[in-house]
Amino acid sequence: MNDNCGHACGDLVLSDVAKLIKTTARVSDVVGRYGGDEFVVILSNTDEDAALSFARRVIEKVNKHSFITPLGRLEIGVSLGVSVWQPDNGNGNLEERMRVLLQQADMALLESKRQGRNRATIGGKHAR
């Protein structure tokens, strides 16, 4: 985004995306910016189906949103990577489990980007 329309425009879009994610999340969930144009959301007590449902809602909100910027109205697409904690994620150490979850989500994100925008990937499953 920043490469195409500049940092001021990119920052406005990222701010709007963050708000859309926060309005989709529950009060018990944690939403944060992970870096660049990436966000991380920790959904408590959530299985794969519920995580993909959340991802679909985020995609839908972003697609319906009018991003108003100094360059005018923009439409953007999103790629999402999802991972869900499983008992074999790490060695029981919280830091290790989080590292594994983030690594899995990042690999899923790369697959979503490879497949095209407006997609969420988890373990080879896709949501549009």
Image: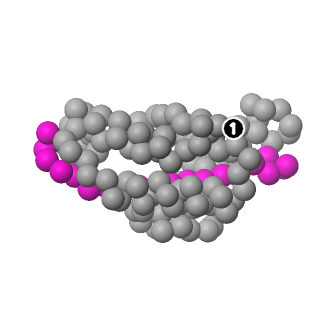
Evaluate whether residue 37 shows in this view.
no
Q: Position of residue 108 (x, y in %)?
A: 58, 56
Question: How many other residues sit within 10 Å of disc 1, few (<14), some (14-19) or many (≥20)?
Answer: few
Residue 25 sits in quarter: top right
Determine the secondary structure under disc 1.
helix
Establish if 5 lies above or below 64: above
**Percent from the top left, x then y, of residue 4?**
21, 46
Residue 15 lies left or right of residue 106; in this view the side is: left
Give yes or no for residue 17 being in the magenta stretch.
Answer: no
The quadrant where residue 121 appears: bottom right
State which region is magenta: 70-89
Q: Is residue 118 visible?
A: yes
The quadrant of the picture occupied by the N terminus is top left
Magenta stretch: dominant secondary structure: loop
What's the residue type where badge 1 is placed?
Answer: Arg
Q: Which residue is mark 1?
A: 99
Rendered location of residue 96, percent (x, y):
76, 35
